[in-house]
């Protein structure tokens, strides 16, 4: 999960990116030092970029999340926004919280608890079919704050039978976070009979047992940005794509890239979706590329595609609600949809210019292309898949989808007055300019 970071050395915390907000800078807590690890993340054989990123982030011994056990923050108590004078007081409070916690970042659902989770719960209640038992799955549940907030809201605001018959399953890859989630939800005793954690990788098809034929909800908050991506390269816009692999060179400790013709089926499927003819900017790009050919690099959300394929296969009647970054400032890594690669030492942040510099010491997270997310969602649901002759299938849409700015989503489903300060400043609505919500529900229009 790439989350809300408030790092004193940075002028603008990631989720507080707004052209309407004056920039400010706080004193650095320590000297910046690059954290170059000598450990090897890969063996002697080259690996695809997504496998390198997966190891760099999730390896049980070498990965970033396993080494940074205190990277996800938990607030002892909710912030009393209505008691704060305005933005300056809010940012001062955040600075104090981060210093006391000595962690890397807080999730939005944590900073704005319980109101952020309550907005999600309200969206679910308004949209779901309440004639069947409510089933919710959360992918990457963090500290369990979302789960508890959703369960709290449904317990207090839905008919009693809805709460009594519902189930909430968290699918969490981290054993330590799975334990924290149980402890968080257990703060309300009645929640325990409805909540369980499955410690596994949600994108692993074998982890899902039988196909769930009943309607259900899937929640993914700040999950897409940390899913492994692949990288493809071409010498010019008119040259074919080549898949990028990472390799160790015997004569050097540094990692290097290796380019090969496309072979990986997952990369091929992702390119097929990315370069679909319905892309609103594909034609202008094609004309421009012929006039001014140059090398190109493109990051592909293959981890997201794999996860969506699994979810649609095992939860065919799921409704989906996801939130994530639509834009990341100050990205130094080259390529379309390139990630921010950032490490933290002595309270200060340092961003790398190459993903190869991340050796278990850095977070690697990507912006989400929500247009592409919608295309992949439709593709994985069975609509617009390619026929054997290479032409798109013309079956009807199987999903109804909607993308909203965070402020629009919370204004519609949340309680904005609860996160407003005395002078009218509302960080949840005013500062989250580079995050969006994606909602997707099934439809019966399949003709």
Image (spheres, rainbow, N blue to C red):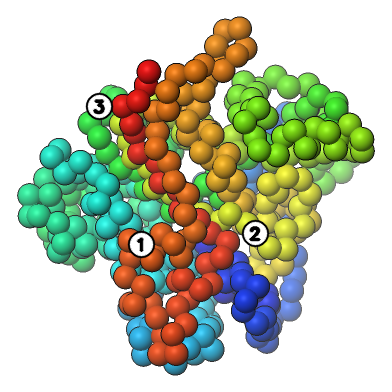
Secondary-structure class at tag 3: loop
Q: In the picture shown, does residue 417 fall above or below 40? A: below
Residue 229, image x, y percentages: 63, 40
Distance CA(mark 2)–CA(mark 1): 25 Å
- At 35% from the left and 25% from the top, the residue drawn is 445
In the image, farthest residue toward the top: 389
Task: Compare marks 2 and 1 and give the one earlier in the sequence.
Answer: 2
Residue 417, image x, y percentages: 34, 77
**What residue is shown with label 1?**
412
Tell me if label 2 and label 1 are in contact, CB under 8 Å: no
- At 13% from the left and 52% from the top, the residue drawn is 163
User: Can residue 387 be seen by looking at this rendering?
Assistant: yes
Q: Nearer the viewer, mark 2 or mark 1?
A: 1
Residue 382, image x, y percentages: 44, 22
Front position in the image: 432 or 253: 432
As drawn, is 260 to the left or to the right of 263? right
**What residue is shown with label 3?**
213
Q: Nearer the viewer, mark 3 or mark 1?
A: 1
Secondary-structure class at tag 1: helix
Q: In the picture shown, does residue 386 fall above or below 426? A: above
**What residue is shown with label 2?**
328
Distance CA(mark 3)–CA(mark 1): 30 Å
Front position in the image: 287 or 214: 287
As drawn, is 258 to the left or to the right of 282? right
Tell me if label 3 and label 1 are in contact, CB under 8 Å: no
């Amino acid at each position: 999960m790439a989350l809300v970071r408030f790092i004193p050395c940075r002028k603008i915390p990631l989720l507080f990116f707004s052209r309407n907000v004056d920039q400010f800078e706080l004193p650095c807590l320590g000297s910046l030092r690059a954290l170059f690890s000598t450990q090897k993340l890969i063996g002697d054989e080259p690996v695809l970029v997504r496998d390198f990123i997966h190891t760099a982030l999730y390896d049980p011994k070498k990965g970033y999340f396993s080494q940074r056990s205190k990277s996800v923050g938990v607030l002892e108590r909710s912030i009393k926004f209505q008691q704060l004078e305005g933005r300056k007081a809010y940012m001062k409070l955040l600075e104090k919280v981060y210093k006391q916690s000595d962690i890397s970042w807080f999730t939005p659902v944590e900073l704005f608890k319980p109101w952020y989770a309550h907005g999600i719960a309200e969206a679910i209640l308004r949209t779901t079919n309440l004639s069947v038992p409510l089933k919710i799955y959360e992918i990457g549940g963090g500290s369990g704050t979302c789960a508890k907030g959703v369960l709290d809201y449904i317990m207090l605001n839905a008919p009693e039978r809805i709460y009594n018959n519902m189930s909430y399953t968290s699918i969490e890859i981290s054993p330590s976070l799975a334990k924290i989630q149980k402890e968080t939800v257990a703060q309300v005793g009645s929640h325990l009979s409805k909540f369980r954690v499955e410690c596994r990788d949600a994108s692993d098809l074998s982890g899902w047992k039988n196909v769930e034929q009943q309607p259900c909800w899937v929640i993914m908050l700040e999950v897409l940005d940390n899913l492994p991506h692949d990288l493809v390269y071409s010498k010019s816009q008119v040259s074919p794509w080549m898949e990028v692999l990472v390799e160790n060179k015997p004569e050097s400790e540094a990692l290097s890239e290796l380019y090969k013709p496309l072979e990986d089926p997952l990369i091929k499927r992702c390119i097929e979706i990315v370069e679909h003819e319905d892309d609103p900017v594909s034609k202008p790009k094609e004309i421009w590329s012929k006039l001014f050919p140059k090398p190109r690099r493109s990051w592909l959300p293959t981890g997201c595609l794999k996860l969506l394929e699994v979810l649609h296969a095992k939860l065919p009647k799921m409704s989906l609600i996801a939130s994530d970054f639509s834009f990341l400032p100050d990205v130094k890594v080259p390529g379309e949809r390139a990630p921010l690669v950032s490490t933290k030492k002595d309270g200060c942040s340092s961003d790398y210019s190459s993903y190869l510099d991340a050796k278990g010491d850095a977070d690697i997270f990507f912006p989400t292309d929500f247009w592409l997310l919608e295309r992949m969602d439709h593709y994985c649901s069975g609509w617009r898949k390619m026929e054997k002759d290479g032409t798109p299938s013309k079956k009807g849409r199987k999903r109804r989808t909607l993308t909203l700015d965070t402020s629009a989503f919370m204004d519609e489903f949340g309680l904005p007055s609860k996160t407003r300060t005395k002078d009218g400043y509302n960080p949840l609505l005013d500062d989250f300019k580079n995050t969006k919500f994606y909602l997707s529900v099934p439809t019966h229009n399949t003709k």
